[in-house]
Image: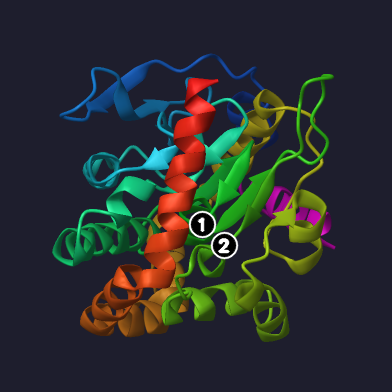
Amino acid sequence: MQHSRVTGLLSRGAAITSRHMMQKSWMEPIIRPAVIRSFASSTEDRPSVSVSKSESSPEVAIVALHQSAFSHETAKALIQEWKAIEQDQTVRAAMLKSDLKSIFCAGIDFKEFMKGPQSFGEYWRTIRQVFDVIYSSRLNTAASMHGHSLGLGCVLGMACQDRFMVGSPSGASAKPATIGLNEVAVGVPVPHWLVELFASITSRRHAERLLPMGRILSVKEALSVGLVDKADFSNQEQMDEFVIRYLAGRSQSPREAQTETMRVIRRNFLKAFRESEEEDVQTITRYVAEEEAQTILKEQLAKLANKSKK
């Protein structure tokens, strides 16, 4: 069913253009794109986020993450880059991906949890802004998630209109990816707006069964509940090429009519999301500061530190 829905969208988008134009924009080999923007955080030399354009489909921007855990600087970088491509009227779509081995996004940098309530509160406001700029975007959006997509990684995927994952990775060393909202597992409740979004994408019953347990799903499980739209890819390159063709197909629809329709579809959720900001920030900040969450987070940081020494 999921495969039919996605391929059907491709077919309907293709019908709008001539056969010649479809072959030109969709069937050309994907050439390695040139980076047109990159943002380096203030603490590291390498960029945390970069933006490029597909040479075969230049209306599709490729937003790539280069850090596994989302620091405050990385969040600010993504907002800056996303707002820049929003201003580029030659861009109709954006693919969100990462260039990290086996990871799309590992979630919030645990160090951000340990900086005190005020610091975390400001960080969480920025995370909300990251979600807002993607979810409210005029662009056609899709997440190409080749690896683990945990916590915030899952949130970034849900902010997009479509989510794709590698279901059966090729290679002896390749490990299957996972996805899910694991906040409860680290002692933090899932925010109300995330519960509602997850339930609207999957179902309320799936939200009730999965979120209170902090369940992480395999790609097959995520596909079965509707969290992922398509997963029959064997590697990232194959998936990225498909996603670019898919986004190019969606972008054949009349610009203004398509943008306004998506705005209406997402309007009510965005209104409630924005109006609940203060309550959301205060609630999650309070829970993060509690002893239970702090103990779990310290244990996780210790595990990461020990792993890095090996």
* Residue found 37% across the figure and 62% down from its top: 294
Q: Quadrant of the C terminus?
A: top right
- Crowd around label 2: few <14 · some 14–19 · many ≥20 (10 Å): many
Whether label 1 touches label 2, CB < 8 Å: yes
Q: Is residue 189 above or below residue 167?
A: below
Residue range highlighted in magenta:
1-16
Point out residue 106 in the picture as x, y percentages from the top left corner.
50, 44
Most foreground residue, 136 or 114: 114
Whether residue 231 is in magenta: the answer is no
7 magenta-colored:
yes
Q: Which mark is residue 226?
A: none
The amino acid type, in three-letter code, at marker 1 is Gly
- The type of residue carrying mark 2 is Asn
- The color scheme shown is rainbow
Q: What residue is at 57 percent from the left and 35 percent from the top?
A: 103
Label 2: which residue? 182
Q: How far across and down, in percent of the image, does residue 156 sit?
A: 47, 54
Q: Nearer the viewer, residue 250 or 211?
A: 211
Quarter that holds the N terminus: bottom right
Lateral position of residue 156 relative to residue 231, left or right: left
* 30 is higher (above) or lower (below) than 144: above
Instruction: List the residue tagged with mark 1.
Output: 151
Residue 185 seen in the current view: yes
- Using residue 105 as the reference point, say whether residue 41 is left or right of it: left
Element marked by disc 1: loop
Q: How many marks?
A: 2
Q: Nearer the viewer, residue 149 or 244?
A: 149
Residue 288 placement (x, y as % from top left): 34, 68
Q: Residues within 10 Å of mark 1 (few under 14, many from 20)?
A: many
